[in-house]
Image: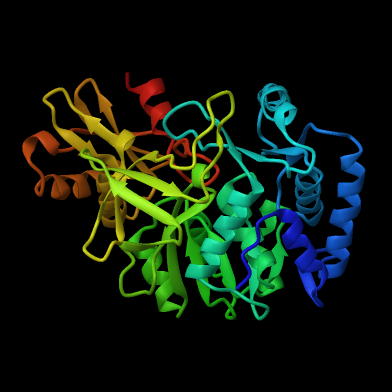
């Protein structure tokens, strides 16, 4: 198995293949095929043009389209940094990030060095940061993925996730492109429920919200044999629905700072424990926080000191290692509420249990002046929720019981990958 070190190496390998690199819907409803040779030629021609611009930063709206993907590769190969932008980002945020990248990164790059990819973190607990990833770190993450869950020329991977999220870039696109799978693109997110039936994927990397929507719409195609779930917790109900269809489910764990992959489940018998990816070390701190060291590590955050080769990243996630070295996740440190009496509440555990018991997935816990409040999004049935909460409270000590329920009236604030923006909910409504 080839382990690519740069984007240039990967594209040169793609150039030597026969067959299709990408498929995507055309305007007339047909399916467009883009060959490996045609895509690689486009990338290298664009790289030649971008190289004439010298060092600098390109803002690329990283939607899953062949044109955007070609631009990402071309800019990096040409030695220009790539700001992986989401179309919903404010212009001022992008301008400031571009200026910072030009000043702090591009001005220090050597002539033959590939440009860095810069991603905005999800910002689940604070203001988003800009993460600097080298193409070598990203390629290392791609190799990690192939080592743990192999794909090949017989596969078709449906790329639905935004490439401005590292999980979407690595698992939705780069992984398959590197190892010969056809990448099925969905540039128009409003039509994603139509894509399985049109493009017939065998592998689908997704977040739980997308999987739930496809299951509810009966949109999954019969050729689909593997679903990779990441970026957010997945309910047991969703996992059972996939398994009932005979689909193999894998759950991955990673961060933007580690170019995505750190660990992944291996087999349907145990979806609670994850095996570490190659070249990954994990240790558990005294408070239960997961620290990680990996070849896929970021160079650092923009405007902050660079990381070193022996750098340990404190993830903010809680977990434990079993006697086989597998990691078990227990939620986030910042998802732990500490009530006035010192009681610690691990919010994701409550939310997972309440969601499974009630069938209402859009719930969150907040601290309202020392009270534990369950907030439900949209038009939740409070009477039904109270029945569930009363039963749940019977299993908890008095200090750990939910005191009240409130209906938010609209979906709870979340990131594009489905992670709850708890800090927004807490700050805006319950402090």
Q: Nearer the viewer, residue 76 or 342?
A: 76
Place of residue 238 in the rendered image (x, y in percent of width and height, measured from the top left): 40, 64
98 displayed left or right of 336: right
Residue 382 vertical placement versus 214 (above, below): above
**Residue drawn where x is 86% and y is 68% of the image:** 37
**Count of number-bearing discs:** 0
Residue 196 vertical placement versus 363 (above, below): below
Place of residue 320 in the rendered image (x, y in percent of width and height, measured from the top left): 25, 52
Quadrant position of residue 10: bottom right
122 displayed left or right of 33: left
Q: Quadrant of the N terminus?
A: bottom right
Place of residue 330 in the rendered image (x, y in percent of width and height, measured from the top left): 28, 49
Q: Nearer the viewer, residue 116 or 21?
A: 116
Q: Quadrant of the C terminus?
A: top left
- Residue 219 at least partly seen: no
Q: Nearer the viewer, residue 157 or 277?
A: 277
- Residue 237 at least partly seen: yes
Q: Nearer the viewer, residue 38 or 338?
A: 38
Residue 420 vertical placement versus 391 (above, below): above
Place of residue 298 in the rendered image (x, y in percent of width and height, measured from the top left): 54, 41
Display colour scheme: rainbow
């Amino acid at each position: 198995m080839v382990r690519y070190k740069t984007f240039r190496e990967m594209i040169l390998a793609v150039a030597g293949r026969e067959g299709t690199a990408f498929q995507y819907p055309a305007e007339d409803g047909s399916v467009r095929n883009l060959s490996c040779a045609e895509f690689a030629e486009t990338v290298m021609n664009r790289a030649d043009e971008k190289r004439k611009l010298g060092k600098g930063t390109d803002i690329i709206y990283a939607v899953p389209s062949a044109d955007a993907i070609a631009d990402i590769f071309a800019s990096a190969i040409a030695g220009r940094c790539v700001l992986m932008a989401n179309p919903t980002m404010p212009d001022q945020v992008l301008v400031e990030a571009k200026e910072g990248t030009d000043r702090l990164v591009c001005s220090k790059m050597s002539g033959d060095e590939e440009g860095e990819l810069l991603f905005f973190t999800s910002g689940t607990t604070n203001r988003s940061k800009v993460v600097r990833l080298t193409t070598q770190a990203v390629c290392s993450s791609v190799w990690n993925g192939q080592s743990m869950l192999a794909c090949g020329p017989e596969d078709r991977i449906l790329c639905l996730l935004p490439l401005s999220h590292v999980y979407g870039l690595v698992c939705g696109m780069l992984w398959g492109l590197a190892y010969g799978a056809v990448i099925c693109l969905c540039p128009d997110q409003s039509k994603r429920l139509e894509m399985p039936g049109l493009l017939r994927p065998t592998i689908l990397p997704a977040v739980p919200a997308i999987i739930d929507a496809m299951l509810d719409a009966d949109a999954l195609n019969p050729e689909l044999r593997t679903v990779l779930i990441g970026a957010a917790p997945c309910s047991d109900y969703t996992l059972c629905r996939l398994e009932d269809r005979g689909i193999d489910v894998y759950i991955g764990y990673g961060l933007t700072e580690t170019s995505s992959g750190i660990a992944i489940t291996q087999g349907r018998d145990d979806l609670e424990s994850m095996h570490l990816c190659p070249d990954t070390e994990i240790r558990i701190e005294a408070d239960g926080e997961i620290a990680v060291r990996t070849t896929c590590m970021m160079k650092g955050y923009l405007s902050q000191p660079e990381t070193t080769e022996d750098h340990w990243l404190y993830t903010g996630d809680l977990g434990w290692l079993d006697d086989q070295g597998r990691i078990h996740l227990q939620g986030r440190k910042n998802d732990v509420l500490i009530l006035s009496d010192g009681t610690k509440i691990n919010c994701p555990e409550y939310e997972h249990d309440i969601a499974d018991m009630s069938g209402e997935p859009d719930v969150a816990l907040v601290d309202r002046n020392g009270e534990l409040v369950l907030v439900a999004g949209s038009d939740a049935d409070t009477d039904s929720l109270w029945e569930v909460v009363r039963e749940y409270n019977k299993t908890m000590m008095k200090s750990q019981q939910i005191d009240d329920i409130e209906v938010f009236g609209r979906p709870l604030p979340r990131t594009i990958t489905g992670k709850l923006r708890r800090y927004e909910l807490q700050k805006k409504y319950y402090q």
